[in-house]
Image (cartoon, rainbow, N blue to C red):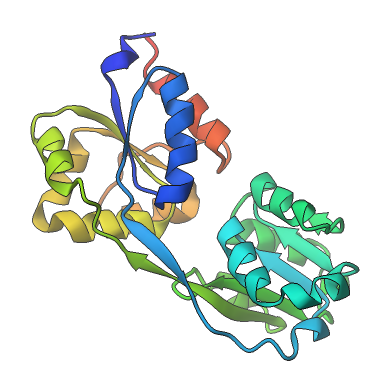
Amino acid sequence: MKNIHTYRVLITRELEDGKVLANRLENLGFIPILFPTIKTVPLDFDTKNITNYDIFIFGSKKGIKYFFQKISDRLEKLKDREFIAVGEKTAEKLRDLGFTNIKIPEVYSSEGVLSLLKNDWDYYKNKKILFPKAKRGIDLLEKTLPNVKPLYVYETLFNKPENVDGVKSLFENKKIKAVIFTSPSTFLGFKDIFKDEWQNFLKEVNVISIGKTTGKTLKEQGITDFYIPRKSTVEDILDLIQELFKE
């Protein structure tokens, strides 16, 4: 392993989640820099027909948080329903709430959920499926499947961190070794902060995309040199970073 104790890794995910990744990176000897380019806020939504749905899809822990904050009084009425969770951490959050009938797609993305549903379409085609999600989230599922209804429970907004000037200086002095983007929004927020400079900054570092959806956004913006971990998890991101900086 190289002298990673001088290697700075920029984390663009929301502050609360970014701290978890930062602690893990620090334990491995890296210098994590929290740079949350997004923040989430809850949205108001209609709850009167929630118990009419057979299946609930959650793409993140955030969706679970904001959805159940508002319908906590009906938690028990949903215990017999089926849930589809994108990723083990999302499933773990559902288990913490007492749900047990949970399926996890092989690929942690909307494409993975779509594949899971289509592989057993005779079963799912007549089910009422609710997808609590971010307002600016990818809408592949509801565009493709007529019985999947999106429910916007939170919104992702761009955020300008307090350490913008310091991070800019680190980029200019080539002191950052890697940047981690954990969603299309984290990248777009980064782009919004650095305007005309973001491309030059990313040319000098290892760019890590948490998954294919984020990678697609990077490609659309002209970034073709980036890495994707085996799975969209913190553990796999850490494995990838360690692999990148081996001797």
Residue 56 at x, y = what percent? 74, 70
Residue 78 at x, y = what percent? 84, 72
Residue 194 at x, y = what percent? 15, 54
What residue is at 14 percent from the left and 36 percent from the top? 171
- Is residue 46 rendered to the left or right of residue 83? left
Task: Evaluate whether residue 122 shows in this view.
Answer: no
Q: Is residue 27 above or below residue 167?
A: above
The residue most toward the right is 80
Q: Is residue 52 above or below residue 217?
A: below
Along the line of sight, the residue nearer the viewer: 107 or 119: 107
Quadrant in the picture for the C terminus: top left
What residue is at 69 percent from the left and 67 percent from the top? 57
Residue 32 figure quarter: top left
What residue is at 87 percent from the left and 75 percent from the top? 77
Q: How many marks?
A: 0
Residue 184 figure quarter: bottom left
Residue 246 at x, y = what percent? 40, 13
Task: Evaluate whether residue 214 shows in this view.
Answer: yes
Quadrant in the picture for the N terminus: top left
- Is residue 218 rendered to the left or right of residue 54? left
